[in-house]
Image: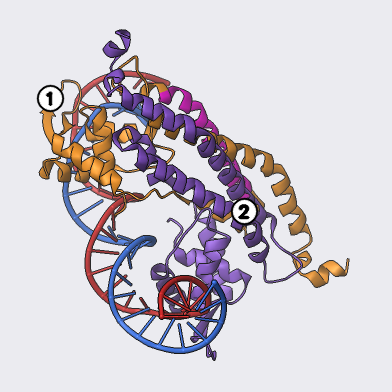
Chain colours: A orange, B purple, C red, D blue
Amino acid sequence: MMMDVRTLSLGLLMHGPMSGYEIKKRLETSFRHFVSAGYGSIYPALADLAAAGLVTVRAIEQDKRPHKKLYAITPAGRERLVADLMATPPRHRVRSEFLVLMYFAHLLPPEKVEQALDAMIDSWERWLGEDIQSCEESGEAAPGVPLTPGMEFAVGYGRAVLTAALAYVKQGRGPFLAALAAEGRDGRAAASPAARAAE
Amino acid sequence: MMMDVRTLSLGLLMHGPMSGYEIKKRLETSFRHFVSAGYGSIYPALADLAAAGLVTVRAIEQDKRPHKKLYAITPAGRERLVADLMATPPRHRVRSEFLVLMYFAHLLPPEKVEQALDAMIDSWERWLGEDIQSCEESGEAAPGVPLTPGMEFAVGYGRAVLTAALAYVKQGRGPFLAALAAEGRDGRAAASPAARAAE
DNA sequence: CAAGACATGTAAGGGGTTACATGATTTC
DNA sequence: GAAATCATGTAACCCCTTACATGTCTTG
């Protein structure tokens, strides 16, 4: 019973009525450190929830903007959310093509490795910069009262870990690239103990 | 073109011939910080690779142990591995039911939150402990020469980030739980600005 | 004596990603 | 004039997860 987009949407709707589009925006701000979902899973999830009576839908006509559908959580939805959360085992997984690439760096041209490294540093630095503002926007609907302790904890976790990751990669980049180049110069022969002993 | 288990297996086979079972063990040690796969995806992947001529298979009969199939990468497999890696965008994603749970902590009984927190601390601490040994085992087939710079970088990343995550959660646990309890005592009324102004 | 390590596989099902389809308005 | 924002959806596909099926030997 893994957590799916349905549960996540239900949870976001605790902040107040929202459209599918807004749910995605929210996921991209408050939750981006640990969750992601595309429209292709959000819209069907919302339709399912409505069919099950866990949310209500209200169509809103807007001028100068496309129509939207406002979803609101129902009492049954709230109960279901809690039940789903209670049934969710606290897992935590990372899937990183970036690190796999680094692991196999010796098989790749150094430029590719450098590009990947810089791309990561770049995206993490931008992320960390955006974090300060997104934090203030993304809290409760109420203006004065920002975040529950849990929200602060989750956001703080993201920031702490991102900071550590960024520091590691920035500090490691130079030595790593240098070591790679050094190995490359030896023509890979240095990788065997025999060759090393012969030096 | 996301990286799949096929590419990963091809990569591991660069260390030398291996069985599906051993591939899984390797993934659970060297790669556990950023990748995971079950037998249900490894065995079919290996069969695909063999059918495509990217690996060869050799059946080994053992006494006192089940038979095994040793897979070895072919020159075509090596080319394919590099091509696959080159085509892999350096992504990095986290999926954490744990942090979602923390985010919605105010909706849950405090015991549940505490349990989740402690379970995470526990598993991360065990992980970090195992890391020291697994590092030495998991390198090249050669005994004297342990790891390429890339492997060291990837393993170091995992350790650095895990350490930061663990520190954050251990330090935050107490204050977080206390803040949760404080909010709970106010009977949720404190969550509205009006109620806060009335204090 | 039970649990875990060793060892390989199949099948169903579920869930997410990606691509497609559409279209007005605003900003650079 | 191009690109981004706002806005909703469908459908195919891919890949992984989970459960099942089987059996011996070693370790606690």
Quadrant in the picture for the C terminus of chain B: top left
Q: Residue at x 55, y 66 (%)?
A: B26
**Which is more toward the observer, B125 or C28?**
B125
Q: Amino acid at mark 2?
A: Val
Considering every residue shown, the one lying at the far right of the view is: A199
Q: Chain of mark 2?
A: B
**Which is more toward the observer, B140 or A139?**
A139
Specify start and end residues of the magenta stretch as a single range.
A113-135
Tell whether label 2 touches label 1 (CB within 8 Å): no
Q: Is residue B101 visible?
A: no
Q: Position of residue B8 (x, y in %)?
A: 51, 64
Q: Which residue is mark 2?
A: B155
Q: Are marks 1 and 2 on the same chain?
A: no
Q: Which mark is residue A61?
A: 1
Query: Judging from the image, what secondary structure is the residue with disc 2 in?
Result: helix
Label 1, label 2: how far apart the Cα atoms are: 53 Å
Q: Chain of mark 1?
A: A
